[in-house]
Amino acid sequence: MGIDADPSDLLPSAEPVRLLDETGTLREVDGFPLDLKEDDHRALYRWMVLSRRVDRQAINLQRQGQLGVYASLLGQEAAQVGSAYVLAEQDWAFPSYREMGVALVRGVDPASTLHLFRGTWFADYDPHRHNFGLPSIPIGTQALHAAGYAMAAKLDGRDLVTVAYFGDGATSEGDPHEAMNFAAVYDAACVFFVQNNQYAISVPLSKQTKAPTIAHKAIGYGMPGYRVDGNDVLATCAVMRKAVDRARNGGGPSLVEAVTYRMESHTTADDAARYRTDEELAQWRRRDPIARFEAFLNAEGLLDDRLREEIDAEAERLATRMREAVYDAPHGDPMELFDHVYVDPPARFAEQRDLLRRELGEGGAPATPAGGEREAS
Ligand SMILES: Cc1ncc(C[n+]2csc(CCOP(=O)(O)OP(=O)(O)O)c2C)c(N)n1
């Protein structure tokens, strides 16, 4: 930003950018042009339907005892697909644990993301093949990865943009703050994409921040903040296109707040009925991102029964592959927990490894821990 620039240019619009109203009618907005062809519309629809199906499959696998836990994206399909769709092949996405839709668009086999949730292995895909980072469970840490990667890419003269995906709750943590500050100071080609799904587990947004909106925080870092209707896939594409182009052209980072809603519980281990009302849920159900886009496609004559059937059949094939890959997948050797952690393990680390080895016993099955031997944790 030049010294004469008006800081208020960094502020988000009063209302989230929205191109499709709740009935699916398109109204273009100045400053956020759509550069999508008919095939792009069909592709966006396809990715959203596939995302919803693989998400449902993952929940079912957890309910069948095949996954330890799973974090659903239901309701966030437009935010995830729209934001990932505008990325170029060389760009990088750094996800949290909720980004199955982004994974799909980056070409990651959804089955391979599930080993994390089963506990068989961290992940079964090569991040460098898809430019899609490993899921971060510690909240917000991936923002640092995205900022650092973009800073390093700039030093190396590589043309790429990184996107950090995190939630509204993560904005209360230190890591996203440090990431946004450094990215801005170093003009890193990084977009911070916040899916504001209204809750951090049971903590509502009102208890998360006193800022008028999450996007307003951007001005504090000296970067533009955009606010978009995250249940509108076209608006998400248009806003992300602006932020990504800006980063690619050397304009530095931006913060994009996609206003959306998590329709499921936080994870399969949570019961959202304890802190949300039926009225609130019904209100957001009316803003369903797929139904809204489908209404638009129908009105434009871009969707027919044949295409719908093709996409549904592809979704079923994906779901079948997920079941086959995950069902009763063998667990690895628990001792691997200690591999690749230290070059020179400290003594305490070696003691813990020996303790686990003793607990597992000869056959690999966990032995009953001997009371005196277990360390307090
Ligand atoms: C560093 C850290 N602190 C706390 C947690 C526990 N935790 C798991 S999910 C979560 C809420 C995250 O909410 P948000 O960032 O809004 O993302 P969402 O899950 O809604 O997508 C918390 C606090 C954690 N995983 N990592």
Image (spheres, grey):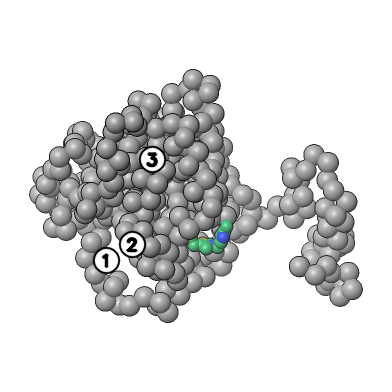
Q: Position of residue 323 (x, y in %)?
A: 50, 56
The residue at the far front in this view is 4
**Residue flagged by tag 1: what amino acid is it?**
Trp
**Residue flagged by tag 3: what amino acid is it?**
Gly
Given residues 185 and 363, the one toward you in this image is 185
Asked if ligand 1 lies within 8 A of label 1, the reply is no
Q: Which residue is mark 3?
A: 222
Q: Is residue 61 left or right of residue 348?
A: left
- Distance from disc 3 to disc 1, alpha carbons, whole Å, reads 33 Å
**Residue flagged by tag 2: what amino acid is it?**
Tyr
**Disc 3 and disc 2 in contact, CB within 8 angstroms:** no
Q: Is residue 74 left or right of residue 70?
A: left
> Dot 1: what SS?
helix
Asked whether the viewer can see residue 314, the reply is: no
> Which residue is painted at 50% across and 38% down in the image?
182
> Which residue is painted at 12% across and 47% down in the image?
26
Dot 2 surroundings within 10 Å: few (below 14), some, or many (20 or more)?
A: many
User: Disc 3 or disc 1, which is closer to the eye?
Assistant: 3
Q: Earlier in the sequence, mark 2 or mark 1?
A: 2
Q: Is residue 81 left or right of residue 342?
A: left
Asked whether the viewer can see residue 22, the reply is: yes
Q: Earlier in the sequence, mark 3 or mark 1?
A: 3
Labelled disc at residue 261: 2
User: Disc 3 or disc 2, which is closer to the eye?
Assistant: 3
The residue at the far top in this view is 157
Q: Which residue is mark 1?
A: 284
